[in-house]
Image (tube, rainbow, N blue to C red):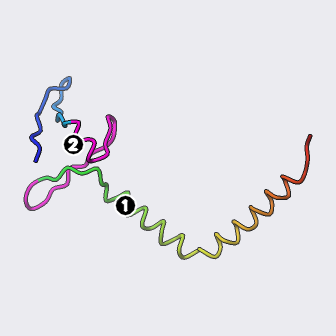
Amino acid sequence: MYTLKLATVGSSTGVVIPKEMLKSMKLEKGDFLYAVETAEGYVLTPYNREVEAQIQKGRVFMKQYRETFKALAVLINLRLKFWSKSSFN
């Protein structure tokens, strides 16, 4: 368990997070940290539920259109091979 210290930052209050905690959470200065309210209090996490929901929707979309993406990849690969054979030198 870590003890976090509140500090004045301009006219606001900030939380000082130890380097070891930042490292284990894979956070750097400028990253976002989310405070999630739970029955026991607040939990600080780098995990954003809204972003995760968007990623999940993207995965569903990609799975639904997997064959379309494969066909596009084949077409792009053919076009790249054609361009590489066309010499502009």
Residue 56, position as x, y percentages in the image? 42, 67
Calculate the distance from the C-alpha at mark 2 to the C-alpha at mark 1. Answer: 22 Å
34 inside magenta stretch:
yes
Q: Are discs 2 and 1 less than 8 Å apart at CB?
A: no
Q: Circle 2 sits on which residue?
A: 21
Q: Residue at x 54, y 76 (%)?
A: 64
Residue 21, position as x, y percentages in the image? 21, 43
Label number found at residue 52? 1
Instruction: Name the secondary structure under disc 1.
Output: helix
Near-viewer residue (43 or 22): 22
Three-letter code for the amino acid on which mark 1 is drawn = Glu
Vertical arrangement, residue 21 with respect to residue 57, above or below:
above
Nearer-N-terminus badge (2/1): 2
Q: Residue at x 33, y 40 (%)?
A: 31
- Give the residues in magenta: 19-41
**Quarter occupied by residue 76:** bottom right
Vertical arrangement, residue 46 with respect to residue 57, above or below:
above
Residue 34, position as x, y percentages in the image? 25, 49
Q: Is residue 74 left or right of residue 60?
A: right
